[in-house]
Image (tube, rainbow, N blue to C red):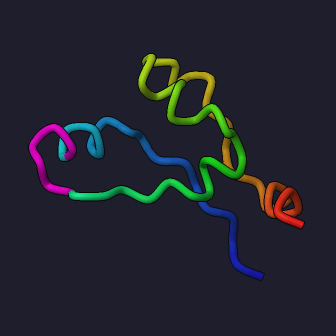
């Protein structure tokens, strides 16, 4: 079994997005855990983001 992933700060990602370093950023696990992830990030509500838990994968079945 893989160790659980650890959440990271979005600050560096947002800085690099603003700089134009990426064409696409995948947030699949984040969206499985919290379908409102993109809305919360857009609105600056990052304190409401939920950590990924493998049980979210069960919502696919």
Would you say 30 lies left or right of 2 here?
A: left
**The magenta stretch spans which residues?**
17-22
* Residue 17 lies in quadrant: top left
State which quarter of the image contains the C terminus: bottom right
Q: Eyeballing the image, is 9 above or below 53? A: above
Q: Eyeballing the image, is 46 above or below 2? A: above
Residue 31 percent across, percent down from the top left: 62, 47
Would you say 28 lies left or right of 52 here?
A: left
Would you say 10 lies left or right of 60 here?
A: left
State which quarter of the image contains the N terminus: bottom right
Badge count: 0
Does the segment drawn in magenta span residue 1? no
Residue drawn at x 61%, y 62% is: 5
Residue 46 percent across, percent down from the top left: 51, 25
* Camera-nearest residue between 19 and 4: 19
Q: Residue furthest left?
A: 19
Residue 2 percent across, percent down from the top left: 70, 78
Residue 28 percent across, percent down from the top left: 57, 58
Residue drawn at x 58%, y 55% is: 6
Residue drawn at x 53%, y 24% is: 40
Would you say 13 lies left or right of 5 here?
A: left
* Camera-nearest residue between 9 and 42: 42
Residue drawn at x 57%, y 35% is: 37
């Amino acid at each position: 079994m893989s160790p659980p992933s650890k959440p990271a700060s979005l600050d560096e990602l947002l800085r690099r997005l603003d700089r134009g370093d990426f064409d696409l950023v995948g947030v699949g696990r984040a969206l499985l855990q919290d379908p409102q992830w993109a809305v919360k990030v857009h609105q600056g509500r990052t304190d409401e983001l939920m950590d990924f838990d493998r049980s979210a994968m069960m919502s696919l079945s």
